[in-house]
Amino acid sequence: MSDSSAGDRLEALYARHGPEALRLVYLLTGDRELSEDLVQEAFIKVAGRLTGLRNADSFRWYLRRTVVNLANSHLRHQRVERA
């Protein structure tokens, strides 16, 4: 897969799944800017694994799990800093 086609595919996936992921992270964190950062980080993490996905529909669930894990990790880190 060429870089441009992978970039186009990632852009299409972001357009399709980004808003839902952003809403989910916002519900978990209550912070719009943090939500945007975590969604971008999730897409970066998932982008390296695009070729390993057998089913394109599984991307949504893989992204959701990554987003939730990143949000939980961030919130856990904040709690530790406060303590």
Image: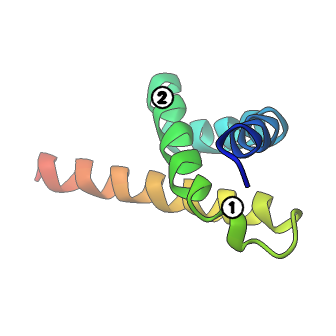
Question: Which residue is located at x 53 percent, y 37 percent?
Answer: 40
Q: Position of residue 44 (x, y in %)?
A: 52, 47
- Colour approach in the figure: rainbow
How far apart marks 2 and 1 lie (CA) works out to 28 Å
Q: In which quadrant of the rendered view does residue 63 lie?
A: bottom right
- The residue pinned by badge 2 equals 31
Q: Is residue 47 left or right of residue 45?
A: right
Mark number, residue 50: 1
Mark 1 element type? helix
Mark number, residue 68: none
Q: Quick check: 31 above or below 76? A: above
| Amino acid on which disc 1 is placed | Leu
Q: Nearer the viewer, mark 2 or mark 1?
A: 1
Q: Pick the residue in front: 54 or 27.
A: 54
Q: Is residue 63 left or right of residue 20?
A: left
| Amino acid on which disc 2 is placed | Asp
Q: Position of residue 69 (x, y in %)?
A: 49, 62
Mark 2 element type? loop
Q: In which quadrant of the rendered view does residue 77 lie?
A: bottom left
Question: Which residue is located at x 79 percent, y 43 percent?
Answer: 9
Q: Quick check: 62 above or below 18? A: below
Classed neighbour count for the residue bearing mark 1: other residues with Cα under 10 Å, few (<14), some (14–19), many (≥20) = some
Q: Pick the residue in front: 45 or 29.
A: 45
Question: Which residue is located at x 65 percent, y 36 percent?
Answer: 22
Question: Which residue is located at x 56 percent, y 59 percent?
Answer: 48
Q: Position of residue 80 (x, y in %)?
A: 17, 56
Q: Is residue 57 left or right of residue 46?
A: right
Q: Position of residue 17 (x, y in %)?
A: 79, 43
Quarter of the image with the N terminus in it: bottom right
The disc, 2 or 1, on the residue closer to the chain's N-terminal end is 2
